[in-house]
Amino acid sequence: MPNQHQPGAELAPERTRLAPPPMYKVVLLNDDFTPMDFVIIVLERFFHMDREHATQVMLKVHTEGRGVCGVYSKDVASTKVVQVTEYAKVHQHPLQCVMEENQ
C-alpha cells in the first residue's frame, strides 16, 4: 500500500533531551590509624593533586571526618575507590574510600 503524502500533515521532529549522566564524589573517610603522610600520597597518586592541594584535603579529612577527592562519572569513581582501597590494604592501612552521588 503506497503512503499518501498529505500537505500540512508532516510530523514535527521529536526533541528528546538527554540528561547528562549522574556524577559521583569520591570521598576519603577519617580513621584513627592511617598516617596523614599516607593520605597525602594517595591523593597525589590517584587524584593527581599537587602537595598543597593534597595537604588541604587531608586536613579536611582529619578535622571534618571526610574529604572530597574529586567528582567523576560512575565508572571512573568506582575504579578510583577500588584502587585506593586496595592500595591502602596492601600498605596495611584501614583507609576507607567511598563514592556518593553528587547532588
Image (cartoon, rainbow, N blue to C red):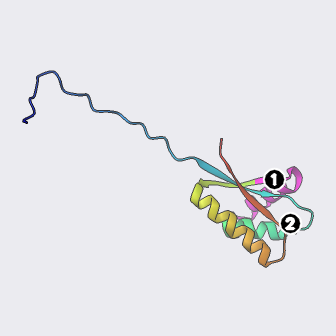
Is 5 rendered above or below residue 73?
above
Q: Is residue 10 within the magenta segment?
A: no
> What amino acid is labelled 1 in the image?
Arg
Label 2 sits on residue: 36
Q: Earlier in the sequence, mark 1 or mark 2?
A: 2
Q: CA distance from mark 1 to mark 2?
A: 13 Å
Q: Which residues are magenta?
A: 48-67
Answer few, some or many: residues within 10 Å of disc 1's Cα (few below 14, many 20 plus, some between 14 and 19).
Answer: many
Three-letter amino acid code of the residue under disc 2: Met
Q: Position of residue 66 (x, y in %)?
A: 81, 53
Residue at horizontal 73%, vertical 73%?
86
The numbered dot on residue 83 is none
Q: Position of residue 88 (x, y in %)?
A: 78, 72
Residue found at the far top of this picture: 8
Q: Measured from the top left, where is residue 82 in percent x and y?
A: 68, 67
> Which disc is residue 66 wearing?
1
